[in-house]
Amino acid sequence: MRKENLILLKRAAALAFVVLVVALIVSKARQMDWPEVLEALRSFDVPTVATAFLLAIPAYLACAGFDLVGRHATGHGLTILRTALISYTGYFFSLNLGALIGGLAFRYRLYMPYGLAGMTISQVIGLSVVTNWSGYVLIAGAVLAYQPPGLPPGWHLSSAVLRTAGAVLLLVAAAYIALCAVRGGSTVSLKGSPFRLPTMRIAALQFALSAISWGSIGGIITWLLQGEVSWFAVMPVLMMSAIAGIWSHIPSGLGVTEVVFLSLLGHAVPESRLLAAVLAFRIVYYIVPFAMAALAFFYLEATAGGRKAG
């Protein structure tokens, strides 16, 4: 009964959060001057947009490399190129569609035709998830500890509180590094399933790939804001929007990301230009790479027959 009550409580809390988020999105949408937003979008010239895509390339490549960490750790025989395509496809499908495609189930679907054992696939996916969030913890901790963002008027959080939060995140990153240094290569049990801890070398690669990914994403938004705010101001907001998007279960965090940016940076940047930058960012980091991931998915499906990982 306790377990069932806890599940019901979690579902109720998730539903309440979604209702709150949708209400905030609708409220913000009604307040926006949409003609101004459209004018701000039209102000992005070709060189500006082209540069945004160039800044996105490291993030695209980093995401394609997430599953290569698992390939190295497990030693499965799937080629580097095919593993990278699966990593890229799985990441951007999950980013854009989330729960609609079943998240982890979709990643399993991409690997199953190649004859990999279930535990091998789990290990690859688990390391990919850890890789993605390792840099998140490291960058969020460093930014908050070094240069806490200026919060909107009325937010009663001191810089000391933000620096403390940053220090805690850095400690989490340090703890993971220490665990890999001491127990790297050994097997532990997670929810009854064996999981091989990464070595220090693999952990360093995880942090590097993830830091490149998150740093590049923040660079895209900072560039599109054209000097209105610094990268250090953008990163905490980006990271809060990522968590809010996950909690909301709304595909691609549509509306959620926009509301978080408007709420936390609206005091520093005119809202029409801020929203235009976030919408342009969606094209660069969500829509275009998702279209490429769809093409990669059809290619993987068409060429999977008879290929085994060995």
Image (spheres, rainbow, N blue to C red):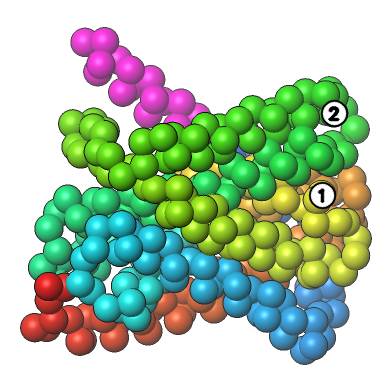
Find the residue positioned furthest to the front.
182
- Three-letter residue code for mark 1: Ala
The reply to whether the C-beta atoms of the residues labelled 1 and 2 are less than 8 Å apart is: no
Name the quadrant containing residue 305.
bottom left
Q: Which residue is mark 1?
A: 233
Q: Which residue is mark 2?
A: 159
Q: Residue at x 21, y 66 (%)?
A: 76
- Tell which of 169 and 49 is nearer to you: 169
Q: Against 194, is 84 above or below? A: below
Quadrant placement of the C terminus: bottom left
- Which type of secondary structure does the marked residue at label 1 adopt? helix
Q: Residues within 10 Å of mark 2 (few under 14, many from 20)?
A: some
Does 216 appear in magenta? no
Residue 227 position, x and y percent, is 90, 65
Name the quadrant containing residue 273.
bottom right
Q: How many marks are shown on the rendered structure?
A: 2
Residue 192 position, x and y percent, is 18, 31
Q: Which span of residues is magenta-colored?
A: 1-17
Magenta: main secondary structure: helix
Residue 177 position, x and y percent, is 50, 40
Whole-number angstrom distance, CA of label 1 to CA of label 2: 13 Å
Q: Residue at x 42, y 40 (%)?
A: 180
Disc 1 or 2, which lies upstream in sequence?
2
Q: Against 118, is 307 above or below? A: below
- Which type of secondary structure does the marked residue at label 2 adopt? helix
